[in-house]
Image (cartoon, rainbow, N blue to C red):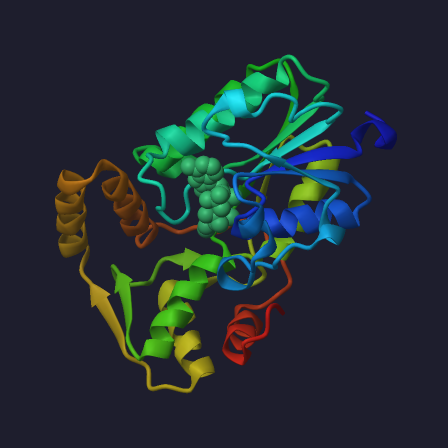
Amino acid sequence: MSDNEMKRVLVAGATGYLGKYAVQMFKRQGYYVRVLTRSEERLREPGPFTAPALSKDDFDDIFVGEVTKPETLVGMLDDIDLVFSCVGISRQRDGLTFEQVDYQCNMNLIDLCASSSVKRFVYVSMQGAENIMQLAITQAHEKVVTALKNAGMDYRIVRPCGYFSDMGALYDMAKRGRSFLVGEGTNLMNPIHGRALARVCVETAEGDELEVEAGGPEVMTQKEAAALAFEVVGKPEKIHVIPMWLARGLVKFIGLLSNQFGDLAEFIVTAGEIDGVGPKRGTTTLRSYFEALHAGKPDV
Ligand SMILES: NC(=O)c1ccc[n+]([C@@H]2O[C@H](COP(=O)([O-])OP(=O)(O)OC[C@H]3O[C@@H](n4cnc5c(N)ncnc54)[C@H](OP(=O)(O)O)[C@@H]3O)[C@@H](O)[C@H]2O)c1
């Protein structure tokens, strides 16, 4: 596809941590950017953990719709060449399951593409999915990937490691004076800043590689990241380890009360024991991110 054909993008998930940076990055790269949102207000507010507030200069038009309800999306893809979706549940909000959001919402978008001008679909899944296929979140993501591969449409898959937004929770705990880690905190990771990941997403959208993994510049353990947060906030390091047997018991208990929270808790616990390391694509260090949070600066 030539550059001229690929210049109109629909960004779904535009109000989230990655989505806000992705909107800005597509715009900066010269795209006509349409954003899907269920709340214009949320688009214009700063997002979680330093994700930027978007202004009218960051996009070209807004389509207000509910991605859970395909009937509200009629006309959304008119004249659109490329769909970028990072719709998914990172923080539980609506009481819906990974199947209902991560899978079904993205299927709604893929189905809509069949009768549209869309030529390519870029989807954000996760790095290392093959190692954690027992999790509901992974199954939902990978069902989308399989559907996309069978949809007869050009596609790209981005597979990120953990986001700096998740590291923000370590910063918050350090600020309160006490950090809790699930497991020993010795598993390795290289989390990535949202802006760096957004750049990878745009490059992937334009490139030939079908699936691209992306992590940040530093490989560290969870414990090292937690210790760094204490150093930046200037408080004595108090890191408590929740043993795996206890965490697993809690997950079972939470799962009995609520499917949705049980699935999320299982994901968090599993993330506490597996490595999540991918190719180094970001350059922003975790220290500078924590320092930006500490200085109350909107971004690094
Ligand atoms: N966080 C990580 O470390 C990580 C690592 C690898 C992959 N990922 C994947 O990357 C994707 C984006 O993550 P993120 O942290 O940027 O997520 P996020 O900040 O929670 O944003 C999620 C987006 O999905 C939308 N969404 C969620 N539930 C919805 C619903 N019921 N109806 C309509 N829209 C809904 C949100 O819209 P509203 O603002 O309207 O709720 C928001 O735009 C997710 O699929 C996640 O699984 C995350």
Kindly identify the residue that appears in the image at 35 percent across and 33 percent down: 133
Res 217 → quadrant = bottom right
Res 123 → quadrant = top right
Is 31 in front, or is 2?
31
Q: Is residue 278 left or right of residue 3?
A: left
The N terminus - image quarter: top right
Q: Is residue 126 visible?
A: no
Q: Is residue 274 above or below residue 149?
A: below
Kindly identify the residue that appears in the image at 50 percent across and 60 percent down: 164
Is 292 in front, or is 275?
292
The C terminus - image quarter: bottom right
Residue 174, x across and y down, in percent? 36, 76
Q: Is residue 157 above or below residue 28?
A: above
How many numbered circles does the render carry?
A: 0
Q: Is residue 213 visible?
A: yes
Kindly identify the residue that appears in the image at 12 percent across and 45 percent down: 253
Q: Is residue 122 above or below residue 92?
A: above
Q: Is residue 230 left or right of residue 280?
A: left
Kindly identify the residue that appears in the image at 75 percent across and 36 percent down: 206
Is 229 in front, or is 276?
229
Residue 150, x across and y down, in percent? 55, 14
Residue 43, x across and y down, in percent? 58, 50
Is 190 in front, or is 96?
96
